[in-house]
Image (spheres, rainbow, N blue to C red):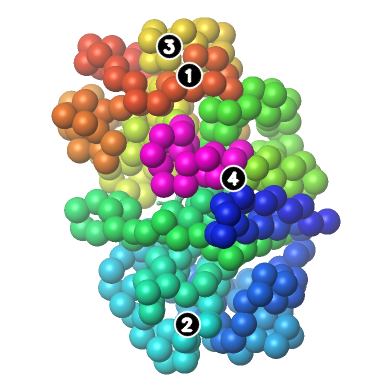
Amino acid sequence: MLYDVPVNLGDRAYEIHIGAGVLGQLGALCAEAGLKGKCLVITDENVGEHYAKPALQSLETAGYTAGMTTLSPGEQTKCGDRVFELYSRCIESGLDRHSFIVALGGGVVGDLAGYVAATYLRGIPFVQVPTSLLAMVDSSVGGKTGINIPEGKNLVGAFYQPQLVLADLDTLKTLPLRELRAGLAEVVKYGIIYDAMFFNELEASSQQLADLGDIELLAQVVGRCCEIKARVVAQDEREGGLRAILNFGHTAGHALEKVAGYGEYVHGEAVAIGSVFAARASVELTGLSPADCDRIEKIFQALGLPVNAPGYKWADLREALAVDKKTVGGMPKFVLSSEIGTVSIGNEIPEETMERIWHGLNE
Ligand SMILES: NC(=O)c1ccc[n+]([C@@H]2O[C@H](COP(=O)([O-])OP(=O)(O)OC[C@H]3O[C@@H](n4cnc5c(N)ncnc54)[C@H](O)[C@@H]3O)[C@@H](O)[C@H]2O)c1
């Protein structure tokens, strides 16, 4: 079973391949995509332990000279120091302009390795092999690469598309449950922003999804998310407008991550809380029905995700919102929904309303 989802970006077009037990096809797919020469696989310890060997074997079987470098897991790895170390690994491994990098891991490895590929020798090809659900449905698709600096998350980066994406659903079997659920928050987001029918299907199958019982269902869900993201990115590669709909739930979510300290909430958990905040604001400002708002809240709960964050003061959250990347003149901008499946970007929420919604959420 291998689902292919095309990302139509003209001369930067590529395929997302999704299947179960397909990691062994990595080398052949790289060859099919026209990749040549040496390659360096970049992974982290958690992922490398399970998947480094099969990935290397597949590349070598296909005739590639493949090296491997393994990083410490976690968000702190996505930093400038690691970028410079990886440039050295690239040189040591003899990578030239015709070589390529394989990012084998979650969003941290994908963003970091992608940024190294975008900048080493002014850009060499790279391949995304996402192993977390979040990376499969979100970070590996669309070409945003980057790192964190002490002043903030993802403040340095490049738009740089991979040559192909290969998502092996079997790798999710070793993903910690909390990370799996966090990925499901992004899955739900696609239903809210783009596809009411998909949202209905997710509601109906939330139990099977939450316990990963049905690989075929998961393949369809990952495929549908990739299709939606690919469609959005094909229309707006560099976030001039439409692509911003992908930020639903992220404005308040990012602020909460910052206030709570990175790591207290994993990204998807903060996005779930931020989505409920945005849904409640949507009821007041953009005509979302209270019933749809309730459905949004319930689906996150059914998937085992938090929907509020008691214990965090509004004043702290508001301060964090003021320095959000998308804030203009101190006023944060929100993606809001008028009905499930339809959203608008660039909305401001009156001060009093934001504060009241935050308190209502957490009382
Ligand atoms: N580029 C984009 O468009 C984009 C979009 C969303 C998020 N992101 C970025 O993605 C990052 C978050 O990604 P993430 O949630 O995948 O985090 P992550 O890469 O830190 O992975 C989460 C944890 O799961 C482990 N892991 C991953 N796959 C595994 C597997 N199959 N088996 C066992 N362990 C596994 C990792 O080692 C890590 O400990 C953030 O840095 C965020 O900024 C980027």
Query: In the picture shown, does residue 333 fall above or below 224?
Result: above
On residue 80, the disc is none
The answer for how far apart the CA atoms under marks 3 and 4 are is: 26 Å
Q: Which residue is mark 3?
A: 286
Badge 3 or badge 1: first in the primary sequence: 3
Number of dots carrying numbers: 4
Out of 300 and 196, give the one closest to the viewer.
196
Secondary element under disc 3, as helix, strand or loop, is: loop
Q: Is residue 244 visible?
A: yes
Residue 74 appears left or right of 84: right
Nearest to N terminus: mark 2 or mark 3: 2
Q: Amino acid at mark 1?
A: Ser
The residue where tag 4 is placed is: 230
Q: Where the N terminus falls, by quadrant?
A: bottom right
Q: Which residues are magenta?
A: 228-247
- Amino acid of disc 4: Ala
Q: Are marks 2 and 4 in contact (CB under 8 Å)?
A: no
At label 2, the amino acid type is Arg
Magenta residue check for 246: yes
- Mark 1 lies on residue: 337
Measured Cα–Cα span from mark 2 to mark 4: 27 Å
Residue located beneath label 2 in the image: 97
Q: Along the polypeptide, which appears first: circle 2 or circle 4?
A: 2
Cα gap from disc 1 to disc 4, whole angstroms: 21 Å
308 w.r.t. 266: above or below: above
At numbered mark 1, what does the secondary structure look like: helix, strand or loop?
Answer: strand
Local packing at callout 1 (Cα closer than 10 Å; few below 14, some 14-19, many 20+) is many
